[in-house]
DNA sequence: TGGCAGTCTGAAACCGATTGCAGAGCGTTG
DNA sequence: CAACGCTCTGCAATCGGTTTCAGACTGCCA
């Protein structure tokens, strides 16, 4: 059916080994032979069978990607970055979505572990012990989370939160609210920590409004608490929450930004599409994906690598319409 | 390293063949033996090596998914549906994104063809000839497009457009605009055809405003033309375009829906999040994904299947805030 | 008791690539 | 001229499963 390495060998008048070498170790085979083999292979439309190669090399050429929810607009850009970088290295990407079900993550890792060379885990809710088990099953890189010595790429939450607070303080806000995401989320904890540090440093008050789902509806649910908190500005866990919040506030007759400033995080596409457009802390999502692949490939090339690889990506505050000077 | 079928065989005191059979053809092996083998396999944590299996069966257990742009909020739900259904059938999904580059699609099909059992092609811009070539390279199912005898799942554009027009006519609109997507898009043509039929039937006027990119910016670019067209209602190619249009109209001081009604298509998540929320023609995206997988698995099970499989999915109009009675 | 059908199991070939090892061919050097 | 080394190539083993085929065993019937 399909053209195999032996077909190429026969047509080129050499052995299968030579064909194999001409393709994957070009320098150890005679130039003329190599040329001929390559030409014949190309002419016959030869495509190496990955399964066969994987069988002997133990490499699949696949990497797995596990994320909580594809529908969350934060992820597509990350996925794109991962794709692009993986394809350049001739890897394919398996995408799996857990539907925000934290308990499914470890199971997915288990079932994926043998079918891929490595796994990229996007902001998992896994507990540290589970994470350790997962890291034992396959080479793993974390995105948006750090844990022990597992390689990871995450945004610089501390600096990001500082930028946000500085911006709000510059606008005259003195009492700032934080609508947190799920308590189990690493980002929630880090962002809270960053906000505390930054607001203490700036001498302003930080009010924790509570934990909410990292969704538009979560933002809607948070509106009540935000109003009660008596703040003049609020930082939301992410853009979706911020947008839900803005929407619910408008429904209650509270204008953003004239009565309340709102800041999101992530700079998802739609944050620039609504009214008002959202002031948000942008993070390089596609780059994060690319970096994650880089780390994983490093890890694969040097499995003994006891060195921890870690990347912190810079953030950038995008000032748009949802923040304004505090009204006294 | 990993536990193989031979390890299981040794531990269970049987041959590798028996283990293989116990796992994949349970009924032809003695019950007691089967039990023992399965218990041992489970105890040892045996996981079949897919590459090895694929080598002999010729099946990879993978399906490929090619789509123009993951960042387009239409796709994530489709992908989720595909995932879910594929996983239930014990298939993994490769996702590949062409970045709206139509010329890359065929290349992707080529490079993916040998690594998957079949491919799901989401709304490709490929020309019919290319599509035929693609279909020759691997079993293929189309989403959001029909072409020849290639199995496909698409929405019922004719009925959908009828619902949209009926809704607008019911509100008193007599002159309706259509902001089309790319001319090369199958959906553009079908939707236009559906709109023509429906408006003729209802005795109202249809004005084609032009072709625009299927994005938020495309909607912004269309605003000028919409105003010039002198219509009281406009149907956009999709929700993103509709939202861009609403945004640009607002910037020009035109209120939606009191001065102009706008209808989107797709019912993407964010269509319910803006102000006004968008009246849109909802299509069952996740179900479309599941159906596509069903079709593909059918096709794989019965490759000779000369019968064309085709699914038309029903649409549902979601009336929200962006449409209102026509002001005389 | 012998023959036969039927059930279950094991040995071995095979899928398509990679790779260790050995040997052919050639040039160089003492 | 012999010995040696180097470059290049082919043979054959191998990865981990599946599947064909033949044979062992059982039970049943004549």
Image: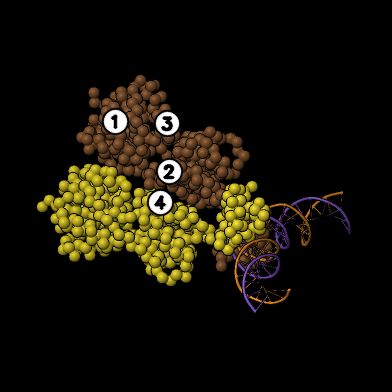
Chain colours: A brown, B yellow, C orange, D purple
Alpha carbon of mark 4 to alpha carbon of mark 3: how far? Answer: 29 Å
Left or right of residue B272, residue B108 in this image: right
The residue labelled by disc 1 is: A226
Specify the farthest residue to the top. A203
Q: Position of residue A251 (x, y in %)?
A: 22, 38
* Foreground tag (3 vs 2): 2
Left or right of residue A297, residue B186 in this image: left
Callout 4: 10 Å neighbours few (<14), some, many (20+)?
A: many
Q: Position of residue A167 (x, y in %)?
A: 34, 28
Q: Residue at x 35, y 49 (%)?
A: B73
Q: Which residue is drawn at 39% across and 56% down?
A: B289
State whether discs 1 and 2 lie on one chain. yes
Residue B251 visible in rendering: yes
Q: Residue at x 17, y 61 (%)?
A: B205
- Nearest to N terminus: mark 1 or mark 2: 2
The residue labelled by disc 4 is: B80
State whether discs 4 and 2 lie on one chain. no
Task: Quadrant for the N terminus of chain A, please.
Answer: bottom right
């Amino acid at each position: 059916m399909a053209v195999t390495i032996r077909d190429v060998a026969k047509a080129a008048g050499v052995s299968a080994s030579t064909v194999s070498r001409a393709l994957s170790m070009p320098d150890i085979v005679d130039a003329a032979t190599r040329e001929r083999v390559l030409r014949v292979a190309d002419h016959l439309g030869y495509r190496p069978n990955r399964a066969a190669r994987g069988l002997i090399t133990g490499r699949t050429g696949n990497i797995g990607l596990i994320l909580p929810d594809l529908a969350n607009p934060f992820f597509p850009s990350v996925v794109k970055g991962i794709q692009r970088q993986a394809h350049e290295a001739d890897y394919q990407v398996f995408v799996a979505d857990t539907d925000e079900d934290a308990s499914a993550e470890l199971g997915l890792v288990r079932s994926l572990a043998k079918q891929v060379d490595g796994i990229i885990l996007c902001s998992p809710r896994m507990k540290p012990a589970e994470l350790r088990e997962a890291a034992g099953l396959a080479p793993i890189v974390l995105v948006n989370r750090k844990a022990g010595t597992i390689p990871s790429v995450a945004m610089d939450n501390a600096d990001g939160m500082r930028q946000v607070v500085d911006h709000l303080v510059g606008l005259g806000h003195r009492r700032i609210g934080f609508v947190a995401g799920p308590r189990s989320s690493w980002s929630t904890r880090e962002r809270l920590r960053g906000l505390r540090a930054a607001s203490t440093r700036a001498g302003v008050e930080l009010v924790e409004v509570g934990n909410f789902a990292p969704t538009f509806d979560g933002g809607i649910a948070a509106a009540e608490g935000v109003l009660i908190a008596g703040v003049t500005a609020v930082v939301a866990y992410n853009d979706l929450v911020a947008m839900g919040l803005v929407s619910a506030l408008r429904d209650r007759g509270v204008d953003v930004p004239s009565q309340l400033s709102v800041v999101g995080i992530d700079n998802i596409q739609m944050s620039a599409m609504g009214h008002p457009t959202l002031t948000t802390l942008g993070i390089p999502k596609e780059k994060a994906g690319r970096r994650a692949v880089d780390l994983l490939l490093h890890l694969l090339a040097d499995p003994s690598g006891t060195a921890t690889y870690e990347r912190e990506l810079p953030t950038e505050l995008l000032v748009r319409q949802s923040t304004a000077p505090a009204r006294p």
